[in-house]
Amino acid sequence: MKIQIRGGRVIDPASGLDAVQDIYVAAGHIVGVGAAPADFHANQVIDASGLVVCPGLVDLAVRLREPGLEYMATLESEMHACAVGGITSLACPPDTSPPLDEPGLVEMLKFRAKHMPGPRVYPIGALTRQLKGERLTEMAELNEAGCVAFSQADAPLVDTQVLLRAMEYAKTFELPIWLRPQDPHLAREGVAHDGVVAARLGLPAIPVPAETVALATILLLVRETGARVHLARLSSRAGIEMVRRAKHDGLPITCDVGAHYIHLSEMDTADFNAHCHLVPPLRSQRDRDAIRQGLADGTIDAICSDHAPVDDDAKEKPFQEAEPGATGVELLLPLTLKWAAEAGLPLTRALGYISHRPAGILGIEAGRVAAGQPADLCLFDPDAHWLVSAASLASLGKNSPYLGFEMRGRVQYTLIDGHLDFRREPPRGHHHH
Amino acid sequence: MATNLQLTEDGRLRHLLTLEGLPRRILTQILDTAASFVPVAERDVKKVPLLRGKAIFNIFFENSTRTRTTFEIAAKRLSADIVNLNINASSLSKGETLLDTVANLSAMQADMFIVRHAAAGAAHLIARNVAPHISVINAGDGRCAHPTQGLLDMYTLRHYKGEFHNLRVAIVGDILHSRVARSQIHALTTLGCPEVRVVAPKTLLPRDVESLGVHVHHNMEDGIRDVDAVLMLRLQNERMRGSRLPSAGEFFKHWGLTPAKLKLARPDAIVMHPGPMNRGVEIDSEVADGVQSVILSQVTFGIAVRMAVMSLLAGSGAQA
């Protein structure tokens, strides 16, 4: 299958390219940008005029809910939702049921995902068996089965000796560890940021030190072991400042934030909206501003969707009893674009946080538009407005803080491995708004 | 937002969920209406026919005999039909969701739900999901709000102390876990009380509590000096030892209300407590039973205040 993508505004954040050019795709790869290779005859031409053509998005946290949590969403539904959101590579955390702590589970997931349309799936293996924080998993075996990193997802790792040894063992094989810094004792029973809104509403609180105390432990152990650690979902100004200093000191760490945290704060929980019950909690406006600053100055390496589809029954509960999380794969792009517009950042920079930068963290060849690269591409209309609603979301998770809000920027085509895995109907070219 | 949810389009009370964001005129209207119900209790026939034929459901997801009973008495004095439902958490975990339960009860032609729940915001959630003719009264949701308790405290304060604009009030004890304290604070600041103090150790105060418009005191002597009213809070048994407090004894020594400490307040200061009291933990018996204590009056006024809330809600419901 040979595809010509004609007349789009090609943006490649890795090289800084931003120009109207044609792209030529053959045998799953990009074979030309700008100039067609000799003897190229397209089987299909995609008219991309008015569209941005950028690398397929790389999302560091997508819960596919399989195995075991199919009442929330299915592999098939969420793989499709990813394609609808322009995502062509994803990492999925091991918080499935059972957790991804055995090679067989990982192989099965990879096998199932490979045989359906949608993004490339990179499982994150469980760091400890059953995510209990006690015994290490067979990391080398799991790595061979396809795990690109190891994490506890949101499960606590109480025993710091286990954490130290996990880092030492992972370092032995040069395997990365992903950790969401949260001290389980300081966060115990908490559901909301320890600030003005929790004071008013009487919600059990999670103080900022829940993040910073855990972060301090992790950073000291990284210093000790040299393990490569990725810090997932930072939420606080103080935490970001610690990472800034640790990076300055040369520690081998990277970090991400969830797309919702760039825009929302504790104020959005003030009317008990369970869709804003997230982990970590939405914090103060100062924390949110620090997240924006951390992105702008490069302290934060990537934006992820932290996709967590949740069924209605689990959300239609009082705030503290509702299952936390928000659907995210279809909002990753528009929320990133919204931030870029508000911060006055060019797309060549902003899109890097959801393409080549997370690809670098995963250590995969993805996130670039250049000849020789895999043909994973996202074509979006930067000016299309669309309403977030249960009907407009492809994910089975309709749990979004943005229900009823209008988003700007919508994916029209998603190519994965040279295949057109998603095409929005009706075809573009008519007026939107 | 909460405010809109509680009011009809023309500004009358639609649900009573929290005292936060309710306008002063509504609070005053409830207190004035309650005043008209106080004499009912002193008559031979303690009933008025205002809510005849109305079906009121006491839905308690968390046990509280006392609060449930005061609502029951208030409803009966208004001639309403009242049904008590104790729904414990285990029956909910059998599969029926909170909203399923509410939908079922709505189908029984209810006019009003009185809801007690262990989670903050439960009454808000129910209010957002009930049929338009049903009003919801929050009888306590987690640590968030207990608006009828806050209102009866305001009624008691006004009864003994007059208007709020020259009062100095101290709220003492476990502010962090107290829905009563939050409702008192919102009511006092809305009604124009110029100085609301909270008195507690740091472990029993929410972070950023100053943002509620209160002055923070850790030392009880400083905290109750020259106040017109001391509002004590109940200390739950499970808080008396552990990581928030070392012992009930140490709490009583520093934050228990004794005759000696009460002398620091104004000579005519009143003492209040939402009940049930832990004598010797938060309050000395001599104070609880003393001349400055108005604790039993609070209970009496509580019936009238709940009658007022129900009658106002029934009025707005009928016309909505």
Image: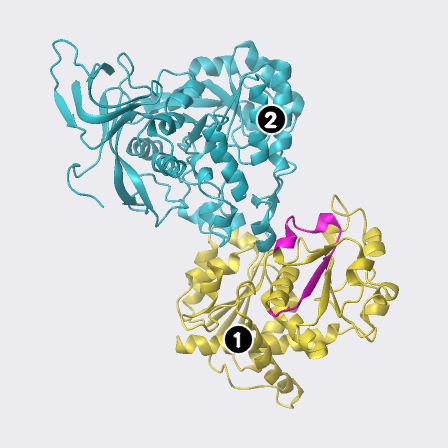
Chain colours: A cyan, B yellow
Instruction: Locate residue A112 relative to residue B117 in the image: left or right.
Output: left
Instruction: Report the front residue among B247 and A313.
Output: B247
Q: Position of residue A421 (x, y in %)?
A: 24, 27
Farthest bottom residue?
A: B44
Q: Is residue B108 above or below residue A174?
A: below
Please name whichever residue, A60 or A351, is drawn nearer the observer in this view of the structure: A351
Secondary structure of the residue carrying tag 1 is helix
Could you tell me residue A167's position as x and y percent?
Answer: 59, 17
Residue under mark 2: which chain is it in?
Answer: A
Residue A283 in sight from this viewpoint: no
Q: Amino acid at mark 1?
A: Met
Disc 2 and disc 1 on one polypeptide chain: no
Report the front residue among A20 and B91: A20
Which residue is located at x 74 percent, y 43 percent?
B243
The region drawn magenta spans: B191-211
* Chain where mark 1 sits: B
Residue B11, by quadrant, is: bottom left
Residue at x 81%, y 49% (from the top left corner): B247
Task: State whether residue A14 appears in this view.
Answer: yes
The answer to which image quadrant residue A118 occupies is top left
Count numbered badges in the picture: 2
Local crowd size for mark 2, using a 10 Å CA cut-off: few (<14), some (14–19), many (≥20): many
Q: Which mark is residue A133?
A: 2
**Amino acid type, residue under disc 2 in the picture:** Gly
The residue carrying mark 1 is: B310
Give the quadrant of residue A342. Answer: top left
Q: Secondary structure at mark 2?
A: loop
**Position of residue A351 measured from the top left corner of the image (x, y, whole percent):** 36, 28
Compared with residue A196, is residue B302 higher up or lower down, i.e. above or below?
below
Q: Is residue B5 above or below residue B39?
A: above
Say which of marks 2 and 1 sits in front: 1
Whether residues under marks 2 and 1 lie with C-beta atoms below 8 angstroms apart, the answer is no
